[in-house]
């Protein structure tokens, strides 16, 4: 599964886990993607869309 939003292009960010003793290990911040049916050029299509795009109304869900 692709970890990239098909609408805004949001992708995983990379950062560090920081322990109580301040040791750093690498980690990934994955976007919250949902597989939904959206309208693309008037036709329904399955796509992975982040929840921010769904909530803001950037995509129209197909019924």
Image (cartoon, helix red, strand yellow):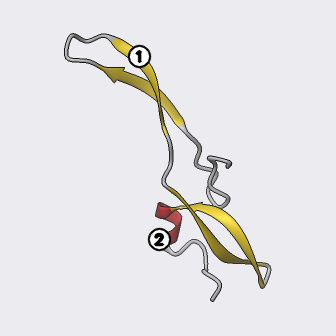
Q: Which residue is mark 1?
A: 25
Dot 1: element = strand
Q: Nearer the viewer, residue 43 or 9?
A: 43
Dot 2: element = helix
Q: Which mark is residue 42?
A: none
Q: Is residue 17 left or right of residue 1?
A: left
At which x and y percent is residue 41? 80, 79
At which x and y percent is residue 50? 53, 59
Q: Nearer the viewer, residue 37 or 53?
A: 37
Q: Which mark is residue 56?
A: 2
At which x and y percent is residue 63? 63, 89
Residue 61: image quadrant is bottom right
Residue 17: image quadrant is top left
Closer to the N terminus: mark 1 or mark 2?
A: 1
Binning the other alpha carbons within 10 Å of mark 2 as few (below 14), some (14 to 19) or many (20 upward) gives few
Seen at 26% across and 18% down, the residue is: 19
At which x and y percent is residue 25? 41, 16
Location of residue 43 with respect to 58 vertically, above or below:
below
Q: How many marks?
A: 2
Location of residue 31 with respect to 25 vertically, above or below:
below
């Amino acid at each position: 599964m692709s970890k990239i939003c098909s609408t805004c292009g949001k992708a995983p960010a990379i950062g560090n886990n920081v322990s109580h003793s301040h040791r750093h290990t690498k980690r990934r911040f994955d976007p919250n993607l949902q597989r939904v049916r959206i309208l693309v050029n008037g036709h329904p299509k399955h796509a992975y869309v982040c929840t921010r795009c769904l909530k803001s109304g950037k995509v129209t869900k197909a019924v």
